[in-house]
Amino acid sequence: MEEKNSLMVKKIKVILSKLGLDVHNRGVITVAKELSNAGMEVVYIGNALPGEIISSAIQEDADVVGVSSLGGAHLTLGKPLIEEAQKKGLREEMVFIIGGVFAPDDGNSLYDMGFDGVFTPGASSEDIVSSIKNLVAEKTG
Amino acid sequence: MERGRQKERTPLYDSDALEKIKAHVEKWMRETVREQDRDEWVKTPRTVLGSDIPREMLYTPLSNPGLDYFEDLGNSGEEPFSRGIHSNMYRGREFTMRQLTGFGSPEDTNSRIKFMIDNGATGLNVLFDIPTIQMYDSDDPFSMGQVGMSGVCVDSVEDMELLFKDIPLDEVTVSIVTHYPSNTAILFPMYLALAEERGIPWDKLRGSVQNDTTLEEIIRSGAEYTPPQDCFRIQCDNIEFIRKNVPGWNYITLNGYNLREFGTSAVTEMAVAIANGIETLDEMISRGFDVDSVADRMAFFWSPASDFFEEVARLRAVRRLWYKIMKYRFHAKSARAMWMRCHAQTSGVSLIQQEPLNNIIRSSFHALAAVLGGVQSLHVDSYDEAYSVPTEEAALVSLRTQQIIQKETGVTDVVDPLGGSFYVEALTNEMEKRILDELDEIETEGGYVACIESGLLHNKISSYFSNQQRDIEKGDIPIVAYNTCKSEIEPPPINVFKYPEGVEQMQKERLQKLRLKRDNEKVGSALEALKDACRTKKNILPFSVDCARARCTEGELFRVFKDSFGLWTPPALWK
């Protein structure tokens, strides 16, 4: 008879995406590798608009949705993303994080908008990994 | 590859002197140098985007005993051009102060262009927004929320008209930052159509386009990619057309900068750019061009970063290396065809969000290294690089950085001031060797385009930048106010650029009007003719110019490319 390992923990599943048409992907690729090394399951969908990001998140049954924006559209596309998440009833169960290049003030606006985690230039992989783990624990716990 | 012809040698260091110095250095090492310095004689600076090249504690003639004045250096303006492409360098012509401008609507950027010119900028450098770069119209669903950010939006020749309003195109040099071959083939024709409409003959136009496959296929994220072979073909079509029809225009700015900023070393940056240059020349020769006429207007674009002497040394090294390639591999005859002419933009990735005013210092060192290395034109990144597109005040500081170098430091009064330095000459040699080694690797693996298709370059670079991130986080690469010399006190906040509002809506309305008022039959047939040219391997540029004249929009031309060439899936950068 097969014994189930009761200590087996489901990997945290993260969807990562470039927000809109943003060309800069060094950061999100680095984060993808780091999250993977930290034991998470990462699905990188490349460039996508909010609607597609949310569809992918639902399809993949993601725990975390992470978007990367260095092109200035963090507010103009961040807002519809959270709104779409709200509409689909995902806000309570999924963690939404954003990273990229924007001013700290805009970072505050992103939190107000509904993002659970905001990472500005200089955020370390340790910050990101532990934030994600804590945020997921908060939402599921 | 041939390594240089036999000629009379002119070694700088006398062999007796070298022997004496060697004996002395051995004594000095034993008696004057501390034991711990002897043990750690060679040290490797760890810097952002650095090449990890080890340095000796002290350089002497022994570091480069065979240094030959005419073989390795020459005077400025003479082969092998290590010391500079012109004999008089900045005494004859100052480096062009070419700061990037681009945000909002064409009118917004037009104002900023005028501001820069009024404050002393000597060249224009126009950057497009991301939808424009990625070849989507401002009203394409994919462009939503991104129009006019991080660059100016241009959808058609009419936007070009607004962008360059009151700017005399026959009097200024304009770098139009069309990164990709594909968007160059769409946007540059709009500029040409504009010149035509203003009655300016194309042979009066001076400036450059990027037109580099590296930017389209390696370093950017995108939803849709043209296959590398087709992208490279368009790159060469651009060169061919511009060579024949716009004689004063630089048709390729080999990259360089964006590759490095994506995350790689100074060495790889140069090896890849040269590999592209070589493959391009081979293609143009097979198209019937004379090598001199093509190399004549090829230019390079570099990213000077923080390892000060590495930056100076590599500019000298690549100048010498490019000369050798042009002379011995391609048998170029004119001096101009052997020159490594370049624009430099100080490294953006090296600037951080914490204590942003520190970035002014960083950029100043980057800029000084570029000038001591002999670049032809320069953009200095602004201190708010890690926040947003520069504010007017930040852009002004960048311009002033250049002006202060030119007017207050005296460095431009002397050509190649670091020439002859034991250190700099040794490092120049080392850089040349390493660049050549990486270039050989690319060639062995099939050449530039093949290495894109196979993922070799993608993988090399993504390994570099992941490792670099780890090293920065570990503190192995020190960054002041980030992982070292940190302050408890938060500095006062800086002004951050806010994008003008309403640009997207305005562009959408413009496009609607444009599509109604233009002759849509002409549009249709122009696009059909372009498609046919794509498929039958004609040079696509004349057809693209027709499209521009007919007021086709960028997205319409990109659709033709997609239909004609199909899409490519680039290698995954991770996993």
Image (cartoon, coloured by chain):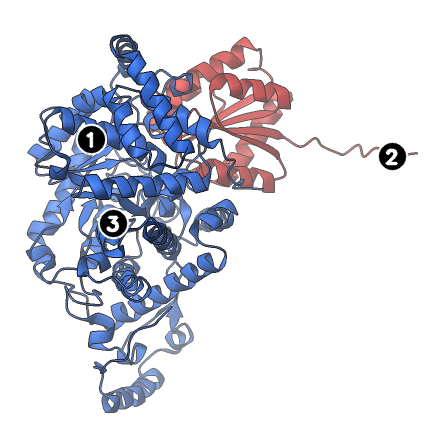
Chain colours: A red, B blue
Label 2: chain letter: A
Res. A48 in view: yes
Element under label 2? loop
Q: Amino acid at mark 3?
A: Ala
Is B275 rendered above or below residue B80? above
Q: Amino acid at mark 1?
A: Leu
Say which quadrant the N terminus of chain B sits in. Answer: bottom left
Label 1 neighbourhood size at 10 Å, few (<14), some (14-19), many (20+)? many
Element under label 3? strand
Label 2 neighbourhood size at 10 Å, few (<14), some (14-19), many (20+)? few
Is B345 rendered above or below residue B24? above
Which mark, residue A3? 2
Residue drawn at the location 25% of the way across and 32% of the way down: B188
A131 relative to B496 in the view: left or right: right
Labels 1, 3: one chain: yes
Question: Residue beneath label 1, please?
Answer: B192
Say which quadrant the C terminus of chain B sits in. Answer: top right
Q: Amino acid at mark 2?
A: Glu
Residue drawn at the location 27% of the way across and 32% of the way down: B542
Label 3 – label 2 distance at C-alpha: 67 Å
Is B522 rendered above or below residue B190? above
Circles 3, 2 touching at the beta carbon (< 8 Å):
no
Label 3 neighbourhood size at 10 Å, few (<14), some (14-19), many (20+)? many
- The earlier-in-sequence mark between 1 and 3 is 1
Label 1 – label 3 distance at C-alpha: 20 Å
